Amino acid sequence: MKPRWGVVLCTCNDTLPVDRTAIGRGLGLPLAPATYSRLPRGDIDPLMRLVARERFDRVLVACCGPPELFAEAMGAAGADATPLEVVSLRERCYWLHAERDAANRKATRLLRAAMRGAEGRREAPEHSLRVGPRVVIVADSPLALDLARRLAELATPTLVLDEASDRFDPAAIHPLPWKASWGRVAEIRGRLGAFQVVVEQRQPIDLETCIACGKCVPVCHTQAISDGLRLREALCDRCGDCLTACEGIGAIRIPRSDRRVIPADQIVVLAERGERPGPTRTGHHVLVGPAAGEVEAVAWRVVGLMGDFQKPEHVAYQAETCAGGGSGKRGCGICIQVCPYEAIERDGLRVRVDQLACEGCGACVGACPTSSLRFTDPSARELFDRLAALLEPIPGATDERPVVCFHCPEKGEAALGAAGRTRRASAASVLPVPVPCLRYVSEADILGAFRLGAAAVALLGCARCPHGERRALEVRLETCRTVLDAFGAGGHRIRLVTVDGSSAEALAGLDELAATVGPSPLPWSGPLPATEHRAVIADTLAALLAATERDPGRVPAAPEAAFGYPEVRAPGCTLCRSCVNVCPTHAFRLVEATHTLELKHVSCVACGLCAQVCPEHVITLRRELPLGRSALEYQPVVQDELVGCAQCGKPYINRRALEAVEAKLLELPQLVDTFAGSRRNLLRMCPNCRAVAAVFETHQGWEP
């Protein structure tokens, strides 16, 4: 039963051309939405009275006011348990599009998407996480001391001072009230609450042993030791005077080459120069050339992450469908390769997700061809429901060419937000779809958008993704372009738009795509029946085959693409079922009634397990896209017949298997006499008759 929605629209002091009648009709509401002009201010009381009177199942407020305000009003009206959604149409819609009807159509789509998404949303499981006070500060300047002082009351700082930096030389900063050492960070491992900082130390002065007596400074005749107790090796002549001065302490070693691991709950890297490393994890804070106020801000972030938390589970894993391995063989593993946070590892032949290390970028979900890894928020169902809500035609609208814009929460969201705040005119056909990261977007997401009626698909995000390289995403984009090109729809309909610095160029790219794209290659034909990766792709291919009347057949795919064609050399196949038993997607099946091995090409994810386990070595995996009509259904690959027992006539084995067994046994010289004469037909008997015949032969003097 569909929930009864209460939809409330704010006209922002009558500055927005909101058409509540058209929006209500587009949303399929029995009554037009309630409209207010000053909702966050003078109209909050009428909203409370409306909610208290109508007792809606769910409430949707379209306003730029803070969601907390409306949640408080709902509580005051006695509806604090009623689910609430708040959507700002001003910056996302009305300030961007001058044409009134186009703006109201887009508003209808955005509201409809919010409603569908809320109806399908499910709470994600959570995991307990404890973050202690250990904070490692890695720095090449005295800013590290300022940060340590700010954190000292609540945290336990440990300083790693860049041994190559001369910024510490002028001042006598030692002894410090915190653990400090010279070094260079070689590696950072782990996650929030359980980091490991691998530090290489070649600086001869060990600050943790040094008592800062300063005795070594005046005895150094080359002035190689600074007031900051750093030995500048380029000035050192190895005279040994400092070693003598420090003999009772032993804080100086020349040469020195140590490697240590420092445990930490959080890490802060302060660098005056250099590039921001990536990918960085939650709790791994990086400031390059920090501006005024940034050090204090990062101190607040560090303190805010200390304590006990419930961390949401971003990715759910279903081992039964995983193509990671089977029958003692390893397959797939693409999720391990694309995860930038080492949150996925082998657990035997399958994989294991470290939920506490997962940062929720969704790269593994976008790459997983079997949907064994699924995102929890948004779920696949929620995402496709949102797409369907955005793309479902608006009554009365004609010649619409919607552009789905998947955008990341970083530069993508910032660019769209900047366009709204500055009232930058843009195409109303561009429909935003937020995703955790562009790496989350799969072939199914892109092709599914076209299946639902999109005219184009854009991906808007960072020029340099904070989660690392995205080669796997680029391969998926090329795969989708190849599919559209093969059907004559045009791969140019798919575009990656990156934001680097100003968002103006990126937004202009979106507008250009919207202005030049042709009509949608596929008409709206209803929501997707299934959301699994290959089910969506198969559904889209079927729609393209029907709409274009083309049949591209098998098309070469990129070597990294998770699409393959397991070519079976029929003469050598014995129908042993090994490929059927190991295939995680059931691309192979054996039809017992007709003794036929069949293949559904579209289901093959190129894991290669079938080729590995085939005892006859007759399967060759080829990287190919399944774009033909025959690829969508099971097709016969090898067919055989049963052979009857030479003694009783009962069918007991298929002919190919029998011939393979005979060939292998009879080619062994030591067995030639075994199956000679009256024993020649032993292999062509069923097990029961063979046992009887063998006993009879032994009575005749045969020694098996």
Image (cartoon, grey):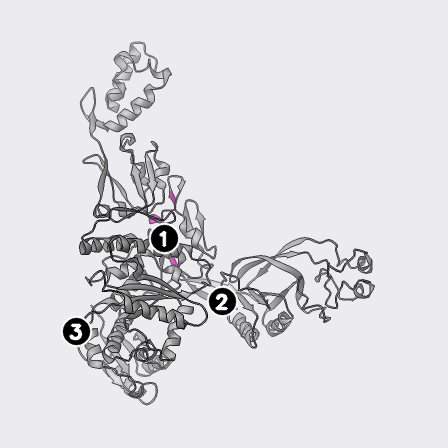
| 150 or 539: nearer the viewer | 539
The quadrant of the rendering that contains the C terminus is top left
Q: Secondary structure at mark 1?
A: loop
Q: Tell me, yes or no, whether the two marked residues, 2 and 1, touch with CB atoms within 8 Å.
A: no
Neighbour tally class for label 3: few under 14, some 14-19, many 20 plus, Cα within 10 Å: few
Q: Earlier in the sequence, mark 1 or mark 3?
A: 1
Viewer-nearest of labels 3 and 2? 3
Q: Is residue 293 visible?
A: yes
- Magenta segment: 313-325
Residue occupying image coordinates x 68% and y 66%: 166
Neighbour tally class for label 1: few under 14, some 14-19, many 20 plus, Cα within 10 Å: many
Percent position (x, y) of residue 698?
A: 31, 13
Q: Tell me, yes or no, whether the two marked residues, 3 and 2, touch with CB atoms within 8 Å.
A: no
Image height check: is 698 above or below 68?
above
Percent position (x, y) of residue 330?
A: 41, 42
Residue 131: image tag? none
Residue designated by label 2: 308
- The amino acid marked with disc number 3 is Gly
| 539 or 137: nearer the viewer | 539
Residue designated by label 3: 396
Looking at the image, residue 178 sits to the left or right of residue 322; the answer is right
Viewer-nearest of labels 2 and 1? 1
